[in-house]
Image (cartoon, grey):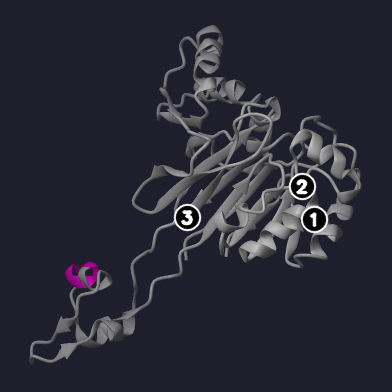
Amino acid sequence: MEPFRVHILGCGSALPTLKHFSSAQVVEVRGKCFMVDCGEGTQIQLRRSGVNFNKVIAVFITHLHGDHCFGLIGMISTFGLLGRTAPLHVYAHKNLRQMLQQQMDMFCFSLGYEVVFHEVDTSTRSIVYEDKSVTIESVPLNHRMPCCGYIFREKEGLAHIRREMIDAYGIPVSQIQNIKLGADWTTADGEKIANDRLTIPADEPRSYAYISDTAYMPSLADELKNVNLLYHEATYASDNVENARKYNHSTAAEAATVARDAGVGQLMLGHYSSRYTDETLLLHEAQEIFPNTILSDENLVVDVK
């Protein structure tokens, strides 16, 4: 099974602290690296993570609050200084396009590679990226400005070859791809060997949902049914529910309720308010509703399974 993992670069909220950086992650799936959000200090954290800068092929911005995008122009500049030549694709609300272009005109006039901007309609659910192995969907959220989350889904892969059967029937290498695609095999004696004897079923596709800043949305559970791993903002504990309502954020209990109702495999909390010096309060609150909950933390790597 190919790696599908999430690298946590930052999991704090609007006010950076000595403990947490602002929001940023790298999602590594099927050999490709996608960044989600790019708060201040992301490029420092990216270096600490060990993820090769050149492997980041796209950045997905959830919304235009600074703690989710202040690090973008600095990272773009650094990529240029490192000699990047491959295009970098940026997916975000249309309002970022002009601001980003102005910053690039000021600071990155001889960049050396192309930054390709893709507008994301944060008000509708849609597939914003697709290749032969992965789709990435936007999910509308309820925040103080246009905002969306993203769902990363593997496409169904090919069956696995049973090497001992291939060897036993002397099947040539040239036919292995056809067998992976579902073909049977007929021996020189005319015996038909069914495909299910030659293969093992493909791995079950995995999925990861990144739910950024949002007020509690009961309907969100329907959008996230059965994802393997859910990252959901949990800015506050229930003792600060009034602030959650005021600023359109979620509590840890509300994040856990979404996870429970969606039937996800695992919940990961993040986007912690700076008022909490110990996030175990948030963890325990969530685990009372959804036991399989973990805390995100800088430099944590979580496998999607």
Give the label, 1 or 2, closer to the camera. 1
Label 2 neighbour load within 10 Å: few <14, some 14-19, many 20+ = many
Residue 50 coordinates in the image, percent (x, y): 61, 43
Q: Which residue is rendered at x = 41% and y = 42% of the image?
A: 129
Any part of residue 264 in sight: no
Residue 209 coordinates in the image, percent (x, y): 58, 52
Q: Quadrant of residue 186?
A: bottom left
Mark 1 in CB contact with mark 2 (< 8 angstroms): no
Label 3 neighbour load within 10 Å: few <14, some 14-19, many 20+ = many
Q: Which residue is tagged 3?
A: 153
The residue segment tinted magenta is 173-177
Say if the magenta span includes residue 174: yes
Q: Identity of the amino acid at label 1? A: Ala
How far apart marks 3 and 2 lie (CA) works out to 23 Å
- When the figure is inspected, residue 269 is found, relative to residue 99, above or below; the finding is below
Q: Which residue is tagged 1?
A: 253
Say if the magenta span includes residue 62: no
Label 1 neighbour load within 10 Å: few <14, some 14-19, many 20+ = many
Any part of residue 221 in sight: yes
Residue 211 coordinates in the image, percent (x, y): 63, 46
How far apart marks 3 and 1 lie (CA) works out to 26 Å
Q: Which residue is rendered at x = 67% and y = 60% of the image?
A: 259
Q: Which residue is rendered at x = 49% and y = 24% of the image?
A: 94
How far apart marks 1 and 2 lie (CA) works out to 8 Å
**Local SS, label 1:** helix
